[in-house]
């Protein structure tokens, strides 16, 4: 869940200064700053499973894997946000000073809760699609087995494929690697899912 921090309008520089001293992460939306709520056990389990599946293969293919503490800057919409999982081909291109913000992900994966699913599928996907480097966007729900895979085609259209069975697997567009839903959801306990997130 994303909660508004206050009604003040921030410059990007003010946001970055706030973020540098804050104990919690914030998202920046064209002047508006929002607190990002903490994750659940299921959210963490899914991110861990994705990293375990992706990291060994990506390392061999000269891709870099980042998780939810690395920001992405989306210039068209003036947005700073923290994808749950982000893959970059070759080397990251950094925005501004330091190595905390990148601009060139080719794959982004968001783990959606009931409260963030509509935002992740709607406005956030609009923001991400404006990144010229992005080739694939995957949305993984944490309250049930449900994965949406969006792949950018050669004519800049986005192809959606939906997966809802734990026996299914799908291939990534950026390299020949398959992910199985069974592995993505390993040790996720839906009956203990907190419906408030």
Image (spheres, rainbow, N blue to C red):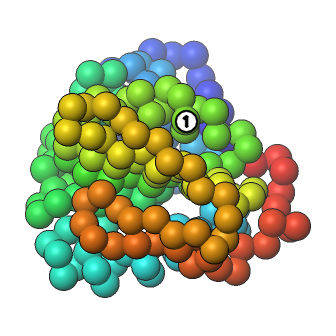
Q: How crowded is mark 1: few (under 14 residues within 10 Å), some or many (20 or more)?
A: some
152, above or below 43, in the image: above
Placement of the N terminus among the 4 image quadrants: top right
Residue shown at 30% from the left, 57% from the top: 173
Front position in the image: 72 or 126: 126
Q: Can residue 184 be seen in this view?
A: no
Residue 79 location in percent, x, y? 36, 29
Question: Circle 1 — which element?
Answer: helix
Q: Is residue 20 left or right of residue 124?
A: left
Q: In which quarter of the image is residue 147?
A: bottom right
Q: Quadrant of residue 77?
A: top left
Residue 5 location in percent, x, y? 59, 30
Residue shown at 75% from the left, 48% from the top: 197
Front position in the image: 170 or 184: 170
Q: Quadrant of residue 70?
A: bottom left
Q: Is residue 17 left or right of residue 190?
A: left
Residue shown at 82% from the left, 61% from the top: 193
Front position in the image: 8 or 190: 190
Residue 21 location in percent, x, y? 41, 48
Q: Is residue 10 left or right of residue 192?
A: left
For disc 1, the marked residue is 121
135, above or below 189, in the image: above
Residue shown at 58% from the left, 32% from the top: 119
Residue 185 location in percent, x, y? 64, 72
Front position in the image: 146 or 116: 146
């Amino acid at each position: 869940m994303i909660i508004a921090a206050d009604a003040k309008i921030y410059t990007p520089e003010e946001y970055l200064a706030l973020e540098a001293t804050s104990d919690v992460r914030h998202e920046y939306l064209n002047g508006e700053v929002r607190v990002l709520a903490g994750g659940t056990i299921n959210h963490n389990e899914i991110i861990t499973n994705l990293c375990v599946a992706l990291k060994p293969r990506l390392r061999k293919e000269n891709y870099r894997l980042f998780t939810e503490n690395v920001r992405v800057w989306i210039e068209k919409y003036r947005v700073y946000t923290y994808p749950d999982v982000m893959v970059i081909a070759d080397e990251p291109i950094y925005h501004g000073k330091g190595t905390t913000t990148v601009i060139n992900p080719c794959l982004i994966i968001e783990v959606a809760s009931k409260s963030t699913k509509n935002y992740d599928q709607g406005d956030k996907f609009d923001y991400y699609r404006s990144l010229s480097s992005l080739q694939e966007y995957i949305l993984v729900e944490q309250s049930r087995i449900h994965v949406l895979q969006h792949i950018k085609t050669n004519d800049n259209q986005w192809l959606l494929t939906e997966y809802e069975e734990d026996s299914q697997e799908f291939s990534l567009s950026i390299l020949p690697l398959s992910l199985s839903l069974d592995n993505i959801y390993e040790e996720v306990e839906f009956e203990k899912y907190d419906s408030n997130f």
